Image: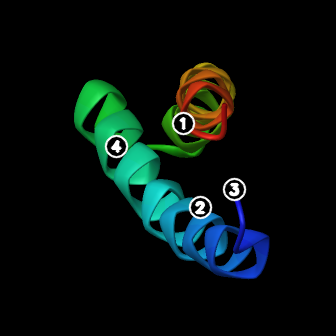
Amino acid sequence: MEDSGLMGCGLFVIYIAFFFITGTIAFNIVEPHSFIGVLIFLAVWAIVQFVGQAILATLFALLTR
């Protein structure tokens, strides 16, 4: 790509949006009602975030070719 600065800014904006999207997905999966539920929610959120980042990284790697 010729303009990698624009791609970097776009990736940052998408990462921020993705942070909230994965949090919402994890919250809907767990729906915590207690302290233990919150801990499980945080663990599920980390897993969903990791899987989502791997997918996004693959997609953006393919886009930059």
Q: Is residue 49 above or below residue 15?
A: above
Closer-to-camera residue (51/3): 3
Q: Mark 4 or mark 1, which is nearer to you?
A: 1
Task: Residue type at mark 4: give it.
Answer: Phe
Q: Quarter of the image for the C terminus: give it.
A: top right
Q: Mark 4 or mark 1, which has the lower sequence index?
A: 4
For the residues labelled 1 and 2, the Cα–Cα distance comes to: 16 Å
For the residues labelled 1 and 3, the Cα–Cα distance comes to: 9 Å
Q: Is residue 56 above or below residue 2?
A: above
Disc number for residue 15:
2
Q: Quarter of the image for the N terminus: give it.
A: bottom right
Residue 28 is drawn in which quadrant? Answer: top left
Q: Mark 3 or mark 4, which has the lower sequence index?
A: 3
Q: Are marks 4 and 1 in contact (CB under 8 Å)?
A: no
Closer-to-camera residue (50/3): 3
Closer-to-camera residue (62/56): 62
For the residues labelled 4 and 2, the Cα–Cα distance comes to: 18 Å
User: Within 10 Å of the Cα at label 3, are there few (<14), some (14-19), or many (20+) other Cα atoms?
Assistant: few
Task: Residue type at mark 2: give it.
Answer: Tyr
Secondary structure beneath label 3: loop
Q: Mark 2 or mark 3, which is nearer to you?
A: 3
Disc number for residue 1:
3
Residue visible at 36% across and 53% down? Answer: 21
Disc number for residue 63:
1
Residue 64: image x %, image y %? Answer: 65, 40
Secondary structure beneath label 4: helix
For the residues labelled 2 and 3, the Cα–Cα distance comes to: 20 Å
Secondary structure beneath label 1: helix
For the residues labelled 3 and 4, the Cα–Cα distance comes to: 37 Å
Q: Mark 2 or mark 3, which has the lower sequence index?
A: 3
